[in-house]
Image: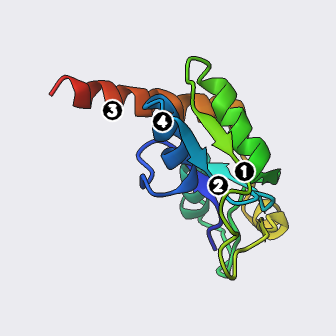
Amino acid sequence: RLFAFYGPADSPQWLIPYTIDSLLKKKKAIEFGPCTQKYAYLYVKDLAAYISLLINNENSPSGIYNISGNQSIELKKLLRLIRRCIPDTTTQLVFDALPMRENQSILIKGNMRKFHAKIGRISLTPLNTGLEETIAYHKFILDENKSI
């Protein structure tokens, strides 16, 4: 079972790429809900490493495995971190401007104990590093689109 992921080439309507694009385009403000939800995001390269570990392990017992980040972060804190990674933006983050969506998940984090015990572990990409690589990708795409 897959949980919350992020990285380059993610769908632009998702929270992280939408926020990065809005900051890079220097929109005046981005309105959000309260952003008190906590998600354990996993960088897409780490997702690929976990899947590779799973399919290349001939002794993997069949079953259901969770694949998730190991540390949840409040979305408000995550968005402020993304903003700090793009220091030349003038965009303001406006929290509590929108209502929380109905049936919104408050915590998204999978339990990885079974995966780690039966399949193995990997070294996870630090959040700052994954965000910086994701932002660099979005800057590249934005620059490419400007030159067309």
Q: Secondary structure at mark 4?
A: loop
Dot 1: few (<14), some (14–19), or many (≥20) neighbours within 10 Å?
Answer: some
**Marks 1 and 2 close (CB-CB < 8 Å):** yes
**Residue 26 visible in the snapshot:** yes
Nearer the camera: disc 3 or disc 1 = 1
Q: CA distance from mark 4 to mark 1?
A: 15 Å
Q: CA distance from mark 1 to mark 2?
A: 5 Å
Please tell me which residue lies in front, 102 or 114: 102
What's under tag 1, amino acid-wise? Phe
- Give the residue pinned by disc 3: 141
**Marks 4 and 3 close (CB-CB < 8 Å):** no
> Which residue lies at the image location 57% right of the left edge and 25% below the top edge?
90
User: In the rendering, which numbered label is found on residue 95?
Assistant: 1
What's under tag 2, amino acid-wise? Phe
What's under tag 4, amino acid-wise? Lys
- Give the residue pinned by disc 2: 32
> Which residue lies at the image location 48% right of the left edge and 29% below the top edge?
26
